[in-house]
Image (cartoon, helix red, strand yellow):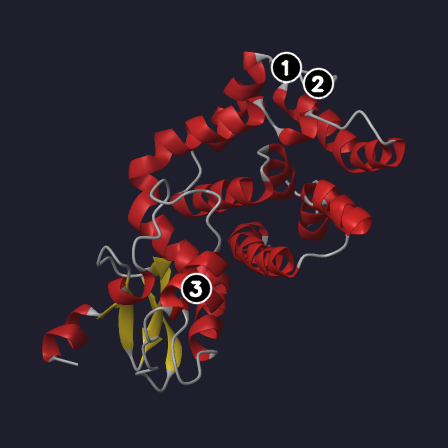
Amino acid sequence: MADNDKKNGIETEALFGDFVPGKQDSTETPMMRAKEMMKNDLPKRFYKEVSIGEEGGSFQVLLDGRSIKSPAKKVVSVPKRAIAEVLVAEWAAQIDKIDPATMPLTRLVNSIIDGVEDAREAMLDEIVSYMGNDFICYPASHPERLLDRQKEHWQPVLDWAGELLGGKFVQASGILAVEQSPVLGENLRKIWSDLDIFQLGAVHSLMTLTGSALLPLAYWKGYLSRDAMWAAAMVDEDWNVEMWGEDEEATKRRVYRRADCDAAGSIIDAFSAK
């Protein structure tokens, strides 16, 4: 490392590319990224020690005493030690080479630092739009056992969210789309409009992973546990596995998606911890 690099921190653009909200397809998974990365040689681990640095109430990951930088060359600094501890664990877990596919929180934090503030209004618009067409408002018409399972996981969330947001969610009957009261979206936007970039980035990530705005809201508010949120999001997928069996590639993608879910969840938990 040159002296300038030591002074200014370690840049990670070559490792993590452009993981910025809105710049990648929401259907893209870490596994797809991992396969892309495998086309090239992964970089060797170049550091020995990983630690946490604290400055002005913020926490940084230090590699051999040097801070790391995001792809946009911003110092990676987080507001909660618990978040920094997970980041440190990811960097420490890299053995011979550095594999971004195994570092979900690092990828998410990079994207938050580099993109959330500038994309705030667009992200809030997208969250409200998701809620207006939330998949938990579209239960199956048959078979009865699937409908019962969806109702068990989804109806309590709909009732709770409706009470929180000052309205009632309408569920579709059949394939026709339903319109929700604009008051619900307006109140959701008010709740999340003042979130700091880390919480907003985390809930937005959970939204894209679950396909729902209401499930992350319930988790963020403490109404659902992380496992309960994930189980509700996976009802249809679990049903298909039961009916048709597991698909190896789909199972692998799900593992990566759950890792991303846990990464986002660790940010929310860090803010809710007493």
Task: State yes or no: discs 3 and 2 in contact (Cβ < 8 Å).
Answer: no
The quarter holding residue 184 reads: top right
Tag shown at residue 114: none
Tag shown at residue 178: 1
Q: Nearer the viewer, residue 104 or 135?
A: 135
Instruction: State left or right for residue 15 relative to residue 236.
Output: left
Quadrant showing the N terminus: bottom left
* Residue topped by disc 2: 172
The numbered mark, 1 or 3, whose residue comes first in the sequence reads 3
Q: Please identify, in this view, whether the residue under mark 3 or under mark 2 is nearer the observer.
A: 3
User: Where's residue 242, x and y in %?
Assistant: 81, 50
Which amino acid is tagged 1? Answer: Val
* Residue topped by disc 3: 35
The numbered mark, 3 or 2, whose residue comes first in the sequence reads 3
On screen, 98 above or below 122? below
Q: Residue at x 74, y 17 (%)?
A: 173
On screen, 102 above or below 198? below
Tell me if residue 224 can be seen: no
Q: Residues within 10 Å of mark 1 (few under 14, many from 20)?
A: some
